[in-house]
Amino acid sequence: MNTTATVVLAGVGALLGLLATQAWVAARHPGRSGGSPIATALSQPEDHPNVTHTHKYSKSGYDVTPLPRGQVEELASKLSPEAYKVTQKAGTEAPFCGNLLDNHKDGVYCCVVCGLPLFSSEAKFTSGTGWPSFFTTFDRDHVVGRPDTSLGMSRTEIECARCDAHLGHVFEDGPEPTGLRFCLNSASLVFYEQGQERPAASLPVPTETAYFAGGCFWGIEHYFDLGDGVIEAESGFMQGHVEKPSYEQVCDHNTGHAETVRVVFDPKVITYERLLQAFFDMHDPTQVNRQGPDVGDQYRSGIWYASDAQKSAAEAYIKKLTEQHKYTRPIATAVEAAKTFYPAEDYHQDYIARTGRMCYVKNPW
Ligand SMILES: [Zn+2]
């Protein structure tokens, strides 16, 4: 090969790399360029408002906290040579050879290294390429995309979000409704048929739910959402006597509801007692039917317990605060059995995170 040809090829390679990088930047920042189907379908770090969390949870309730490198190495050491080569060395199995290519059973395809569910049989289709193909992920928080310019091509590599195992690639030539083709190596997956028992690593995190009313729910929801071990915080209405109340109805003071935050949490990471502490740190429990600038019975302070254990813990915590003389006035927080939780309208959810507006509620963490 002469020098000119080498320079031209190097230039083409650099251009391909640049285009791949630009495509990836555009993919990660859809607001800047209109986005791409691949970016919409995959997990992006910016999607997680709680990036400072030690623990991360997916929308479908799985623990997707990145595993420490040492733990991944230990798990990988038990793999077959083929699965090791694919997942740890970004290998590619020969087409039409994988054991899951012609699998048409109903079930879920999990990461062969860490067990995280990655794809569902509902999204599997026959692509004719020789590799198992899916048009969408099990949960977009479970699969990460990275630019891959190896072999002189501009592609998007896909990895397990929890253990970084290489899975395959994703292309924009798939069927409706996504137009995507997730091209998998069978060796990166383990299949569990519907009804078959799955290991804990392939199941959602067991959760508990707690309910707190501490004035305007915007700030209370925002700060509960930031707690490590909190899977989801949602604004809503509780303890009233009207079904499915609207915000306007609640503000008219005729429904009896209190603005309430439903907190779904991982009890292995955060305790109910720690949530109680955060709740009292966030608001003034001595105010009656008001909180800060907000006045009305929908802003009353309350703990709506979901179990006898929560009731005992809440009463004991209030007793402790009272005995410590933490407040100069009596604690007005009601402790009642939880009635039906009605989620508030969408525009109330994640209000602080979406609008950037601050609020009088104190950060309890
Ligand atoms: Zn994994």
Image: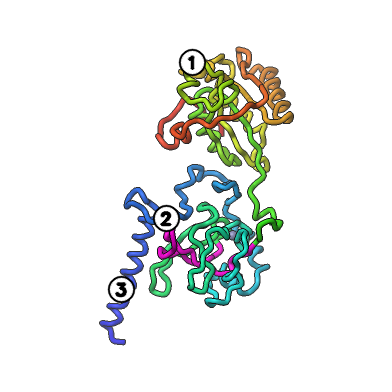
Nearer-the-camera pick, 55 or 182: 182
Instruction: Please say whether residue 239 is one of the residues in the magenta stretch.
Output: no
Magenta-colored span: 165-191
Instruction: Please say whether residue 187 is one of the residues in the magenta stretch.
Output: yes
Residue 360: percent from left, percent from top: 47, 25
Which image quarter has ligand 1?
Answer: bottom right
Mark on residue 208? none
User: Can the viewer see residue 22 in this picture?
Assistant: yes
Mark on residue 12? 3
Whether ligand 1 has any atom under 8 Å from the Cβ at mark 3 is answered as no
Sequence-wise, the earlier of marks 2 and 1 is 2
Residue type for callout 3: Val
User: Pointers 3 and 2 in contact (CB under 8 A)?
Assistant: no
Q: Is residue 307 left or right of residue 12?
A: right
**Label 2 packing within 10 angstroms: few (<14), some (14-19), many (20+):** many
Residue 290: percent from left, percent from top: 52, 16
Q: Tell me the SS state at disc 3.
A: helix
**Label 3 packing within 10 angstroms: few (<14), some (14-19), many (20+):** few
Q: Which residue is mark 2?
A: 39
Q: Tell me the SS state at disc 2.
A: helix
Work out whether 250 lies above or below 356.
Answer: above
Q: Is residue 258 left or right of residue 147?
A: right
The Cα–Cα distance between marks 3 and 2, rounded to whole angstroms, is 25 Å
Whether ligand 1 has any atom under 8 Å from the Cβ at mark 2 is answered as no
Look at the image and tell me in which quarter the N terminus lies.
bottom left
Taking the spot 42% from the left edge, 37% from the top edge, the residue there is: 354
Residue type for callout 2: Ala
Work out whether 32 lies above or below 327.
Answer: below
Q: Which residue is mark 1?
A: 295
Q: Count the marks.
A: 3
